[in-house]
Amino acid sequence: MRLISLKANQETFKDIIFNKSGASFIVARQSNPEQFDNNKTYNGVGKSLLVALINFCLGASANNKITKSLQEKLPNWQFFLTVEIKDKCYRIERHAGSPSKIKLNNESLTVSDFCEKLQKFCFDISPDIQYLSFRSLLPFFIRPSKKSYVEYDNPEQVNKPYQKQLYNAFLLDLNIDLSQAKMLLKKKITDTNKLHQNIKKDPILKQFFEGYQDSSLELADLDEKIKKLEKDLKQFEVADDYYQIKQESDDIKRKIDETQNTIELKKNSIKNIEQSLKISPDVDKKDIKKIFDESKLVFRVNVEKQLSELEIFYKSLKVNRGKRLGRQKQIILNEVENLKKDFVSLKQNFDKNMKFLNAHQALDIFTKINASLSEMIQSKEKLQSYEKLQHDYGQKKISLKKDMILQSEKTVNYLDDAKEDIRVIMEYFRVLAKLFYPNSLSGITVKNNDGFNQIRYDIEAKIQSDSSDGINSVKLFCYDITTLMQGNNHIMNFIFHDSRLFSDIDETHCNELFKIVQDRFSDKQYIASINQNQLNTLSDSVKKFVKKNTIQELTDDSDNGKLLGITVELEYD
């Protein structure tokens, strides 16, 4: 892909026409650089906005700051980016007010479909590889924001080390199947560990983790209990009328007790009668006479009764008493006999019911026992699953560790085989770095990462003492040029650097940087924005080179000198 031009549907916009090959510079100038004015600077003229607009046209998401800002502030604007891919021109149109659609040669596409098409055009990505896309790789060729210049190998500032490593490995033409294989393997290990942790939370199994109990002993105990319950259930006879018979038995038992108590009371009555019969009511005649005499005094009447008549009367009273008590005794004896018969009958019925109840059980008792059995069987199955899982987990851990070692060994062998290809890339970076720092050790190293993580390759671009901002910027420049010139799996033919790249590079190294661009960009595009003050420090030959390849000048003297040709505050990274 090459950038051909960027235009808009508004006349105030300053069209950008890129050189098809070699350098293309956008220079930000001050109309009066000698006069200091806080309101007139290199900022705000449109250098970084140009990058943001190209990013917008190349499928920036709806959540991107530039997309939102354009939709809000410039809803009537439309931008046209023309690119060349494999010698064919494509016109990309995107409307600021309706950014959900992008036209590619008049074909209206959703943003995702558009990006998928450009991915197929520009990058050789296998459908089996995750996380690689046009949008994830584009920032290596047009760094879209200020933070893109912090790390040479992470222009989008992704916070996932695997993806960062994957993007660089892909562009440097390393075997990314090995990268993905380790990532997936590490995920399997992580998932296995999570499963193991989830098992520990099971309420039944938790005690074996917390109490360090032996599940095999618990299983043996459960087996014994289960067998006993199963045997009991086989012998279990359910009676539908169990509780009815039990109630009858309780009633019979109460009647038995009442009958027995009544019999005892009757027997006591018989004993009392027999005791009464033993007592003689005989009275001496003198006593009778005394009573007779006293009665005369009390009643003051004539009592003509003779003493003999009174004696006869008393004897008659005694005989009648004996007969009455005898009859009462006989009645009670008959009642006792009947009660004994009732007692025997009740006892027989009670014994019969108790025999039935002993041989049968109620349905709810059967259900409870069956539920207990089911619960024990479930616990047994869980423990068996736990033991099997523990075994499988142990085997899987061993297997995964073996796979990790085998993959590491495979990677070492691959790196040995690919040593010459990697050396070419390393040497290209090293030659570039030596042009800036001839006495510093430099190069790109690729090593196997055998750690317990998702990272397959440790890829490092190094310039000795590269901790300073200036050296870091030089390293970023060298890495980008190496990726463009010596990388693979892409047909990208341009690099776009914002002026912020040159801010921390001293004038000597800036001169060297532009000489490299002059010498090495014969068939590819190097596009950069540069401030007038940065340009002023360059050598005459470099100034001449920049001037020759300046495609647009942006100034601060009026709105006409700015990229949009108007004053508007847009938000972008």
Image: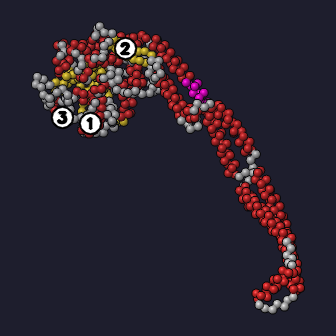
**Spatial separation of the CA atoms under disc 2 and disc 3:** 45 Å
**Spatial separation of the CA atoms under disc 2 and disc 1:** 40 Å
* Along the line of sight, the residue nearer the viewer: 530 or 84: 530
Q: Name the residue under label 1.
A: 70
Residue 357 placement (x, y as % from top left): 75, 53
On residue 444, which mark appears? Answer: 2
* Along the line of sight, the residue nearer the viewer: 122 or 50: 50
Residue at position x 76%, y 51% from top? 358
Circle 1 sits in a helix, a strand or a loop, which is it? helix
Question: What segment carries the magenta color?
Answer: 387-397
Judge the density around disc 2: few (<14), some (14-19), many (≥20) Cα neighbours within 10 Å.
many
On residue 566, which mark appears? Answer: 3
Task: Give the image quarter of residue 164.
Answer: top left
Q: Main secondary structure of the magenta part?
A: helix
Circle 2 sits in a helix, a strand or a loop, which is it? strand
Q: Say whether residue 91 is visible.
A: no
Kind of residue sitting beneath label 3: Ile
